Amino acid sequence: MLLQFFEAMNASAMSVVIRDSLWMVGIINASHLLCVVMFIGAVLMVDLRLVAADSGNPPLAEVARDAHPWLIAALIGLTVTGIPQIMTNALREYHSYLFWMKMTVLCVALIHTFTLRRKVAHAEHGVAPATRRAVGAVSIALWIAVLIPARLIGLFT
């Protein structure tokens, strides 16, 4: 059933238009990379403060609140540019273990980011420094684990 969905994506009119265009693939890829940079920047601003586990100025909760709109905007941009990227080579993606690894870790990283990490980062008081460090370190490790297969997809599939 999933293979049929990927075959339909690969054969869709939108996929053919993007694939046959001289400029669309490049514009979509460049836009996706800009969104990756914006997303990672928003994640690291908070995660590095979590790992540092100091109160700092401004407070971590304020940094997390300020970074959140950038995180959401980048995530929307990644989705809007990522779907056409998948569509243009849907069958290649379907048969790539790196794609499935990336998608699996991506789901875990998103759940971690928008649940535990968000709760710890927005807490004004009462979170132990060791907990903050661990949550930040896990977040950084998860996003690295998303980026590595994402980069390798283009090289090895």
Image (spheres, rainbow, N blue to C red):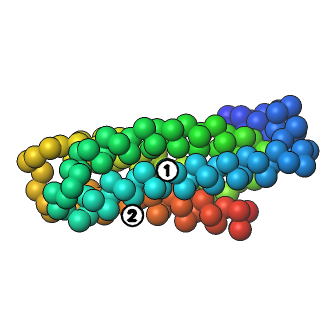
**CA gap, disc 1 and disc 2:** 15 Å
Q: Looking at the picture, how far across and down is residue 66, in whole percent? A: 35, 42
Q: Looking at the picture, how far across and down is residue 7, in whole percent? A: 78, 39
Horizontally, is 134 left or right of 68 in the view? left
Horizontally, is 67 left or right of 51 in the view? right
Hey, which quadrant is residue 154 in on the image?
Answer: bottom right
- The answer to whether residue 12 of the structure is visible from this angle is yes
Which label belongs to residue 69?
none
Q: Looking at the picture, how far across and down is residue 38, in whole percent? A: 52, 51
Q: Is residue 117 above or below residue 6?
A: below
Residue holding disc 2: 141
Residue holding disc 1: 39
- The answer to whether residue 91 of the structure is visible from this angle is no
Amino acid identity at mark 1: Phe
Local secondary structure at mark 1: helix
**Residue at (23%, 65%) from the top-left corner?**
52
